[in-house]
Image: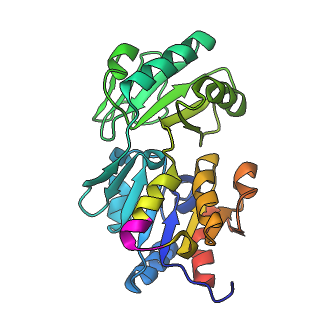
Amino acid sequence: MSDWRPKLIVSDMDGTLLRRDETVSATTVAELERWRAEGIPVVLATGRPPRWMHEIREVLGFGSAVCCNGAVTIDLASMAVLDEDLLAPATLRTVSSELRRRQPDTWFAVEYGDQFRHESTYKPRWDVDAPGVAEATLAEMVATPVAKLLARHELMGPEEFVAVVDEVVGNLATVTHSSSDGLAEISALGVTKASGLAKVAARHGVDAGDVVVFGDMPNDIAAFEWVRAGGGRAVAMAHAHPDLMAVATDVTATNDDDGVAEFLASL
């Protein structure tokens, strides 16, 4: 595949495009600009909600973003919502009540896209006092559709807790994780970065075989499997989670070493 070139470039943000200080290097920005100048669309695929995309928009200023692990797609230039696949209240109530029964020390939060609500016992790691962030009861949070349900356990590790959540959720929704602590991210059934990217690719008239996707955590697995099955390139960062490494077609340097730019330049 030495002469292979993508028709669509997709990158995760945290741990992939962003360095540890949450900046994007000038080298990476220049490389993405070079491809965009050649007419190749650049898409971000992230677990982050739309409300966390304003800073990256100032850096890139173009393209689209698949947010909330596939639940919401936005246009970065206008911040307009292009597509949504939300988690229904009935499913929210069933999943949260059963998880609370199985693990009483599970605490919940929800992403509505531009709003974040969390139980008073849920400990947010970011945006504690940001606009759009507020406390709410679980009953209030599950009354309307959400982009993502977050379940956190402060005493259990990520693998152990996510396994419990997977067992409880079953085929009611989709579970993934991208954190080093006990945090499970729950989306509507079938909603993943892959489902969101498939819609974006179709909008651009591009097949999976013409896509390169970069990532580092388990919430990138579905996107890797989708692009790999179609004959495209699934590129893991050097520090990627072992489960993601197992489904990668290629490996590049770390995010702090401009791995995304390095791989794209090699093409």
**Residue 205 colored in magenta in the image:** yes
- The residue sitting at 52% across, 55% down in the picture is 194
Q: Quadrant of the C terminus?
A: bottom right
Observer-nearest of 87 and 183: 87
Q: Position of residue 10 (x, y in %)?
A: 50, 66
**Residue 122 makes an appearance in the image:** no
- The residue sitting at 38% across, 72% down in the picture is 204
Observer-nearest of 54 and 251: 251
**Residue 140 makes an appearance in the image:** yes
43 on left or right of 114: right
Q: Position of residue 231 (x, y in %)?
A: 63, 72
Which segment did they paint magenta? 201-206
Observer-nearest of 146 and 217: 146
185 on left or right of 56: right
Q: Quadrant of the N terminus?
A: bottom right
- In this picture, is 6 found above or below 16? below
253 on left or right of 132: right
Q: Position of residue 33 (x, y in %)?
A: 41, 79
**Residue 11 colored in magenta in the image:** no
